[in-house]
Image (cartoon, rainbow, N blue to C red):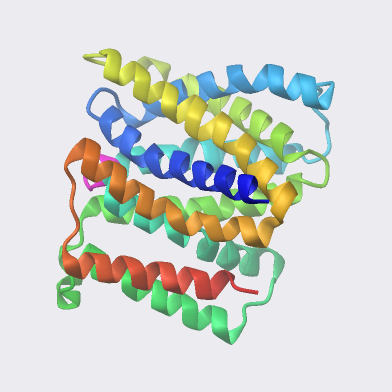
Amino acid sequence: MSKYYMLLLLTSALWGGNFVASKLLVAHASPLSLTFIRWTIAVLFLFPIVLRKERSVRLQKQGMIPLIAMGVSGVVLFNVLMFQALEHTSADHVGLISTLNPIAIALVAYVAYRDKLTIRQCLAMVVSLIGVLIVMTHGQLHRLSDINVGDMWMLAAVIIWGVYSACAKAVMKWYSPLAATFWSGVFGVIGLLPFLSSFSVHDANISFVLAILYTSVGATVLAMFLWNVGVKQVGATTAGMFLNFNPLFTALFAYILLGETLTATQWIGSFITIAGVILFTKK
């Protein structure tokens, strides 16, 4: 079992490093351009994998609308908002704010499917939000009006991820997670085609190429594969606990590669946020 824990830890590291690689990318291209390049590469890599495992990449009529909605929300809007956020704030902040994804998923599920929220989960939401606000304001909660616009973009991205997950829940009646990811990527790329004329990439050096390959293949295709293996072997609940390592890996990689640091107060806020998410996801 320990080897599957290591796989899940590697998955967390790949996702945590995604924000650092993306921070490097925003200096070379627009959010729309980066989203299109990332997912075009990811779709090309996913195609043979889906074909081999699913025996077919046939698109079904059932679930078409929520599948397209997955592409628009999770592929286009989430990625554009994430890259937009990284143009204005640090990878540390983006990584931490992304830990609110389970809460956003639950809130959207409550609105869309009337899934119940317990008192403990509501309390956990408040705890996590306080932790995030401490990080965003550097511990000066009275300065909420001075919150970085990049942090707000990432909060918007988290909400969009909740919408994406709600759409995915509907799609899973007809598609496997692998096929759903592939087709949502296809529809996302198609949705970006009308904006091709506005795409721009400059100073595309070797660092840019390596970072884009990391985000598209490492943090998308490989991480998704390892995650599915881990969930199958240890269960979704146990696997979900490893997601709490994501912001810690982001902070580590951001420190090593970007020289970003968090203050003592922000570290306290980070652990409060993670504690709130653990409390929220605990069964």
Quarter of the image where one finds residue 166: bottom right
Left/right of residue 197 with respect to residue 190 in the rendered view: left
Residue range of the region highlighted in magenta in the rendering: 86-90
Q: Does residue 57 show up?
A: no
Residue 165 percent across, percent down from the top left: 62, 51
Whether 173 is drawn above or below 38: the answer is: below
Is residue 83 visible to us here? yes
Identify which residue is drawn at 35% across, 69% down: 271
Residue lying at 66% horizontally and 46% vertically, measured from the top left: 230
Up/down of 183 relative to 18, above or below = above
x, y percentage for residue 110?
63, 69
Taking the magenta stretch, the answer to whether it contains residue 247 is no
Q: Residue furthest bottom?
A: 119
Q: Residue at x 69, y 50 (%)?
A: 231
Q: How many marks?
A: 0
Q: Quadrant of the C terminus?
A: bottom right
Q: Is 139 left or right of 182, judged from the image as shown?
A: left
Q: Which SS type dominates the magenta stretch?
A: loop
